[in-house]
């Protein structure tokens, strides 16, 4: 027997695929990834000096090597060692002297009826086993899995520091690559998660609206504090939670927290009103300015709540998505009076003039609430635009309500109504927030001038209808 057998080693111990950690998530850059290379060796002596796993199978006097044929030992001083064969090399093909071509190492499935000592499920084919046993002059082809990454010191023992994103050589300590991007999944923290474990790998984006740009250090509230513990009080005062608390007190994060609270408030309010991100940012910016003025001792907002409402209101007006004060009141505990006063202060402070909101700006929103047709919406806008100059001092919501009311009366029974039932004065009042009586009052004022308010040739206006609509 020229290729010596060693005791049975479970296949899993020599299978090359086992050297790649299974915990690696697909797509992650893996310092232990293998590249497979092929090598050829030529033996001239009888005994090559390599070992592989084999079993004695009942009914056969020839031992069988397990498949795949992986070298488990290279004897020191042997020809194999001089040639450069290594443990874990996998023999792919053999060519005994005199043969023209390589003979592939084939797999031979184990006969399930045979009970043998090992756990192998397949063997190397009999012919190859014979050649390996015989030894002598022979060429073999092996494939070798080599780590893709290698340090300049020659070591391939490289580890990845996932926290820092560095690849570090375990032998000499050189950082081979910095800022390695991790491709593994990103985790979020949730507010109600109290385990204290923060799976985030990065903090929030820096926020220029915070005094520290959101880049300050915070002591985590969990985990032990290192250092000598002398008594129970030490343990108490030295706990990480305590440290965190003290640090928080002393830092300007306290100031940040107040403003963060307000920002959260603005966000929630805008979400309830269905306002876009753009408004939230604009309102937060305004709040920041107001907050700084207040720190200088200027009294601007009566309450945080009122200030928040006011900046949201102003932001809406500025970005041309006006909301009425009434709508704002529906999502806050502040009174209209409070908001109104604070709003005036802030307007002055910011040098912004929100300008009178026009009924024209809010009709599209109200008509979509009332599910009016496009024709009716256009007609309402036209009426409102024409009527506004005649109605000084009228609140824009009442003007909008009255314009919609008039458009509905005009369109009653015409194709412009879109076949739907048109809203009553009460429903219009509910949608616009203007009192029904006020809407009727404004409508009466409009009715007098109705001929001047209507666009020429509106499809919605059937001839004669303009004179037959009621005057209240
Ligand atoms: Zn190294």
Image (cartoon, rainbow, N blue to C red):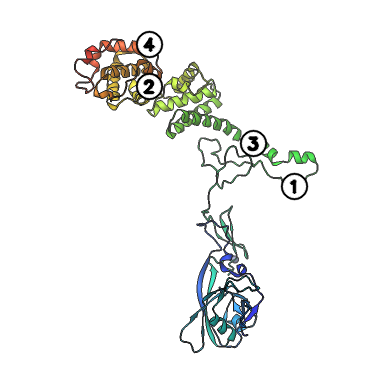
* Disc 3 residue crowd, few under 14, some 14–19, many 20+, Cα 10 Å: some
Q: Give the secondary structure at mark 3.
A: helix
Residue 160 in the image: x percent, y percent? 58, 58
Q: Do the residues labelled 1 and 2 touch (CB within 8 Å)?
A: no
Q: Are marks 2 and 4 in contact (CB under 8 Å)?
A: no
Give the residue furthest to the bottom. Answer: 98
In primary-sequence order, the first of circles 2 and 3 is: 3
Pointer 2 residue:
355
Residues at marks 2 and 4, CA–CA distance in whole angstroms: 26 Å
Q: Give the secondary structure at mark 2.
A: loop
Residue 43 vs 196, above or below: the answer is below
In primary-sequence order, the first of circles 1 and 4 is: 1
In primary-sequence order, the first of circles 3 and 4 is: 3
Q: Is residue 362 visible?
A: yes
Pointer 4 residue:
437
Q: Which label lies toward us, 3 or 4?
A: 4
- Determine which quarter of the picture holds residue 391: top left
Q: Do the residues labelled 1 and 4 touch (CB within 8 Å)?
A: no
* Disc 1 residue crowd, few under 14, some 14–19, many 20+, Cα 10 Å: few
Tell which quarter ligand 1 is in.
Answer: bottom right
Pointer 3 residue:
248
- Determine which quarter of the picture holds residue 67: bottom right
């Amino acid at each position: 027997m020229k290729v010596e057998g060693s005791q049975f080693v479970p296949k899993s111990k020599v299978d090359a695929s086992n050297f790649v950690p299974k915990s690696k998530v697909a797509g992650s850059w893996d310092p232990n990834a293998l590249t497979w290379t092929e090598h050829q060796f030529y033996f001239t002596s009888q005994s090559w000096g390599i070992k592989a796993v084999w079993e004695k199978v009942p009914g056969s006097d020839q031992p069988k090597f397990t498949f795949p044929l992986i070298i488990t030992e290279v004897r020191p001083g042997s020809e194999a060692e001089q040639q450069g064969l290594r443990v874990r090399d996998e023999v792919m093909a053999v060519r005994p002297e005199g043969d023209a071509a390589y003979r592939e190492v084939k797999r031979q499935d184990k006969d399930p009826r045979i009970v043998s000592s090992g756990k192998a499920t397949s063997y190397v084919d009999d012919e190859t086993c014979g050649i390996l046993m015989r030894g002598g002059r022979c060429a073999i082809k092996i494939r070798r899995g080599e780590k893709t990454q290698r340090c300049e010191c020659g070591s391939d023992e490289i580890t990845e520091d996932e926290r820092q994103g560095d690849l570090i050589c375990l032998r000499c300590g050189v950082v081979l690559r910095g800022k390695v991007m991790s491709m593994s999944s990103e985790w979020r923290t949730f507010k109600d998660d109290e385990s204290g474990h923060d799976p985030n790998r990065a903090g929030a984006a820096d926020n220029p609206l915070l005094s520290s740009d959101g880049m300050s250090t915070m002591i985590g509230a969990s985990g032990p504090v290192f250092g000598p513990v002398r008594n129970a009080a030490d343990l108490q005062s030295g706990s990480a939670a305590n440290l965190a608390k003290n640090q928080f007190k002393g830092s300007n994060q306290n100031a940040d927290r107040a403003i963060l609270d307000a920002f959260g408030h603005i966000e929630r309010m805008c979400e309830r009103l269905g306002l876009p991100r753009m408004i939230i940012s604009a309102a937060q910016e305004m709040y920041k300015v107001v907050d700084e003025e207040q720190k200088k001792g200027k009294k601007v907002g009566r309450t945080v709540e009122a200030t928040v409402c006011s900046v949201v209101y102003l932001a809406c007006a500025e970005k041309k998505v006006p909301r009425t004060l009434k709508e704002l009141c529906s999502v806050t505990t502040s009174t209209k009076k409070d908001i109104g006063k604070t709003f005036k202060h802030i307007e002055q402070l910011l040098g912004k003039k929100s300008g009178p909101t026009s009924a024209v700006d809010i009709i599209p929103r109200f008509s979509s609430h009332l599910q009016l047709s496009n024709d009716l919406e256009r007609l309402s806008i036209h009426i409102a635009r024409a009527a506004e100059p005649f109605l000084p001092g009228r609140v824009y919501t009442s003007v909008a309500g009255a314009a919609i009311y008039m458009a509905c009366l005009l369109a009653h029974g015409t194709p412009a109504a879109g076949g739907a039932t048109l809203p009553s004065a009460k429903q219009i009042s509910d949608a616009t927030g203007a009192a029904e009586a006020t809407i009727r009052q404004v409508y009466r004022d409009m009715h007098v001038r109705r001929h001047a308010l209507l666009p020429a040739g509106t499809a919605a206006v059937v001839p004669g209808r303009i004179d037959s609509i009621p005057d209240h």
